[in-house]
Amino acid sequence: MNKIRKDWNEIKINDSWAIFKIMAEFVEGYEKMAKIGPCISVFGSARTSEDNKYYQLGVDISRRLAEAGYGVITGGGPGIMEAGNKGAQAGGGKSVGLNIDLPFEQFHNKYIDEESNLKFDYFFVRKVVFVKYSQGFVILPGGFGTMDELFEALTLIQTNKINKRPVVLIGSAYWTGLIDWITNVMLKQENNISEKDLNLFKIVDTAEEAYNYIDDFYKTHELTPNF
């Protein structure tokens, strides 16, 4: 027991120094992102190949958003993230990558603007920067990381911790099973959410539908800081 307490005390002492590194990541992220202007985050799998239809959709929606004046933020890596940055540059908009140091998958793609290529060690700092500077969220098919980003955004909107933002899920074939479970189990069976929470997102199948949903949203809402 004494050994356990000693080891734990040493861990806590070492952890206190991490605060300075965390602060540095926040400061750098805030300083760089504040200069970019309104952006839309594009989330999706790092494993999606260039010939996949969802990669092409990622390019298409990001290009449309860039042409409309939005910057595009991605996680900076390959797959859907690359598609988002590629589309942003094709549309003449700001192309931002929030990279994270991972033991696999992550390396920054070539379509990120050099001055907008940020690097993080901490997932939670990265997610705060994503949310703070995003005026909307486009979610393409992905894995655990994509689900984490999706539910982070939905939770913050649901609890009014950030202003309401458009959340668009692209690919009904991919998302319908999850939404059916949310509706039938989370809502109807367990009563763990409210029916109005189902209005926090929209499922579409085309880049045009996704863009129009975001464009229509901002015909009646202001572009304002999230917090």
Image (cartoon, rainbow, N blue to C red):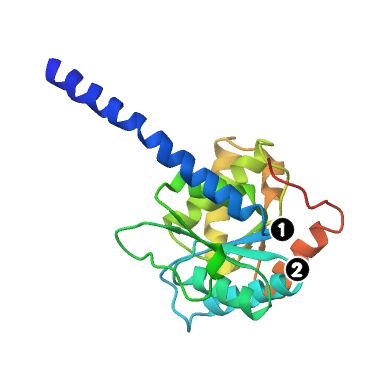
- The amino acid marked with disc number 1 is Pro
- Earlier along the polypeptide chain: callout 2 or callout 1? 1
Q: Which residue is mark 1?
A: 38
Label 1: element kind = loop
The answer to which quarter of the image holds residue 166 is: bottom right
Please tell me the numbered disc located at residue 220.
none
- The amino acid marked with disc number 2 is Gly
Seen in the picture, residue 201 relative to 209 is either above or below; the reply is: above
Pinpoint residue 173: horizontal percent, then vertical percent: 55, 69
Pinpoint residue 213: horizontal percent, then vertical percent: 76, 63
Q: Residue furthest right?
A: 220
Within 10 angstroms of label 2, few (less than 14), some, or many (20 or more) residues? some
**Residue at image location 71% in from the left, 65% down from the top:** 70
Label 2: element kind = loop
Is residue 10 visible in the rendered image? The answer is: yes
**Residue at image location 53% in from the left, 59% down from the top:** 177
The answer to which quarter of the image holds residue 43 is: bottom right
Q: Which residue is mark 2?
A: 69
**Residue at image location 60% in from the left, 50% down from the top:** 31
**Residue at image location 31% in from the left, 63% down from the top:** 104
Within 10 angstroms of label 1, few (less than 14), some, or many (20 or more) residues? some
Residue sitting nearer the eye, 103 or 158: 103
Q: Are circles 2 and 1 on residues that touch, CB within 8 Å? A: yes
